[in-house]
Structures are given as C-alpha cells and as structure tokens.
Image (tube, rainbow, N blue to C red):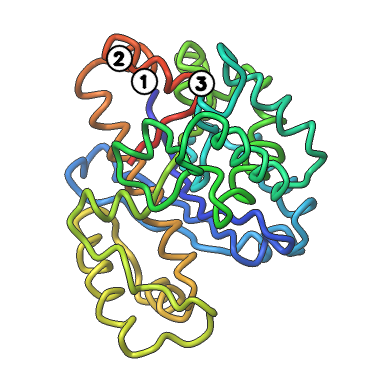
Amino acid sequence: MTFQTIYGVDFSGARFAGKNTWIARLEPPSIYAKNEPLLLASLSSLETLAGTAERAPALAHLVDLIRASEGALWAMDFPFGLPVEVMEPGAGWARQFRFLHAYKHDAYAAGLECVRRARMIGDALHIRRATDTENKAPFDSYHYRIIYQTFHGMWDVLRPLRGDRETAILPFHEYRVPSARRVLVEACPASTLKRMGLPFQNYKEPGGGTLAAKRLRPRWDILDGLTPHVAISKAHRKVIMENGGGDALDAIIAGVGAADAMRRTASKTEMASESLVREGKARYLCEGKQFI
C-alpha cells in the first residue's frame, strides 16, 4: 500500500482528551523528490478539530477523521492490547474487548483487575507485552499512567473501527492491507527517540505551560534530530515550542517513527503479522506490536 498521508496521533484518554490529543499530518515527498524528508502539513489539537475537549465526542470525531481518510497511515500513541498473561488462557485480541466491556468505561478498575491477575501468577504486579520489552517502552500497557490511554484507545477508537473491512489495524488485520484505504499502527514516541539516539527525557513540562529552561535544550536537540526525516516550518516550530506538555512534538515523532517502520517492513518484502509469526512472535497477534 502506498500512503498518500501519514497521521501521527499523540493520544490522551483523560476526561478532556481533546486538549492533549494532537494530530500531525505528514505528507511524503513527491515522486520527483523521493529522497526528501516528509513535510509537516498541519499540526492541531483534537480539541481544535472537534470543537470540544470532552472525551466521548472528541474521540468520536477522531474515529470520523480516520474513516474519512484515504491512502492513510495512522500512527496512534496508545497500546493496542494487553499482555496475554492477564487474559484468560488462549484468549485472542477480540476477547480483550469483552474484558474492557465488563468494566463499563472504568479504566482504572480494569487496570486494577490486571494487577490482581498478575499477582495470581507471580511476584510481578506489572507484566510487559513482548513489544514493550523489545522496544524499551516506558510503561506496561495497564500501568496507572497508561491504562486510560489503553482503555479508551482500544474501546473508543479501535473497537468501532475493527469491523471496517477498509481499515487495517496492524498486526491483527494484515490480510486487509491490499484492499484497505487506511492502516492503523501502534506508535511509541519514546521508543522512536531511543532508536534514533535522541533525547527521550526532560523535553516535557509535566504541568504544561511555559517550558522551563532545562527543557529547551532537549527539545531543540529533538527538532534538530528530526530534520532529516521531516520538514517543519517556523510557524509549526513555534507551536511545538509553546506546547509545554510535548503533545504536539510527540504526534510528529509518532508519524515519523511509524512511516520509517513501514518502510523498513516493506524493504524486507514481508508484511507485519506474516513475518512476526515466522519469527515465533505470534503473541503480537494477541497483544499488538509497536511500529517505531
């Protein structure tokens, strides 16, 4: 599949998810400039696009945007699944949505249940998915700092899209790719920064607002490191530097990382789940896999 547009989404599952969910639209270079970097065409908060920050309507608008896209790669910064160890034996990815449904939109309670199940297995309260370990992700997918992203990303975004035959969610729907109009992959900006050898800490202001002086250098270094991969205008750089929480920047990193991962996959002439199964990583088809 040739992507006409790449969307990087830094996702939030908070009550006012639209405020901290940002979408970067990246366009590939023309056929006459194949070696040029991607172009950052737009950068907006979901609140601006949806007209509201409230989680339910904002995420519904995000689903509408995805469904309306053509020839698009969507890199979503939230876990697409939970570790197999906290699910019933033999449970596949579809069964995970039944698990989420049982908690009636109570993400925190779902996370506590995962902790309870982990305790029944052994001493570790938090079990990482295979992809979390391999890509050195900051947290497991039901950590209290991540569970709202996992829960609402899966329930409010992936659930309404997974039955759409024109949408391929990888690695679960590799078979749909040849006829799909859009592809969704899991991104992890922190893991992408680590792979690129760029700063992955201290570039975000925890409380939002104006960046402290010590956050400026890491953010400048990240922007410099992204230069070979994406062209960012002065106006967009201003937006990035004024967004203290780093959500705007993470959206760009998500898109760049996923686009690069898909190129690397294509260069091996193997699509996602086929190659993963051959490598003995069938658990990706239950837990998800990051494309960084």
Marks 1/2: CA–CA distance: 6 Å
Q: Position of residue 273 (x, y in %)?
A: 39, 16
The local secondary structure at tag 1 comes to helix
Pick the front one: 249 or 38 = 249
Q: Earlier in the sequence, mark 3 or mark 1?
A: 1
Pick the front one: 244 or 65 = 244
The local secondary structure at tag 2 comes to helix
Q: Residue at x 22, y 48 (%)?
A: 195
The local secondary structure at tag 3 comes to helix
Tell me the kind of residue under disc 3.
Answer: Cys
Is 134 situated left or right of 284 in this image?
left
Q: Position of residue 189 (x, y in %)?
A: 38, 53
Q: Residue at x 65, y 67 (%)?
A: 19
Pick the front one: 119 or 113 = 119
**If the image is split into quadrants, where does the N terminus sit?**
top left
Residue density around tag 2, few if under 14, some if 14–19, many if 20 or more, within 10 Å = some
Pick the front one: 159 or 234 = 159
Q: What residue did someone put label 1 on?
A: 272
Marks 2/3: CA–CA distance: 15 Å
Do the CB atoms of the residues marked 1 and 2 lie less than 8 Å apart?
yes
Q: Position of residue 36 (x, y in %)?
A: 20, 49
Q: What residue did someone put label 3 on?
A: 286
Q: What residue did someone put label 2 on?
A: 275
Marks 3/1: CA–CA distance: 13 Å
Tell me the kind of residue under disc 2.
Answer: Ser
Tell me the kind of residue under disc 1.
Answer: Ala
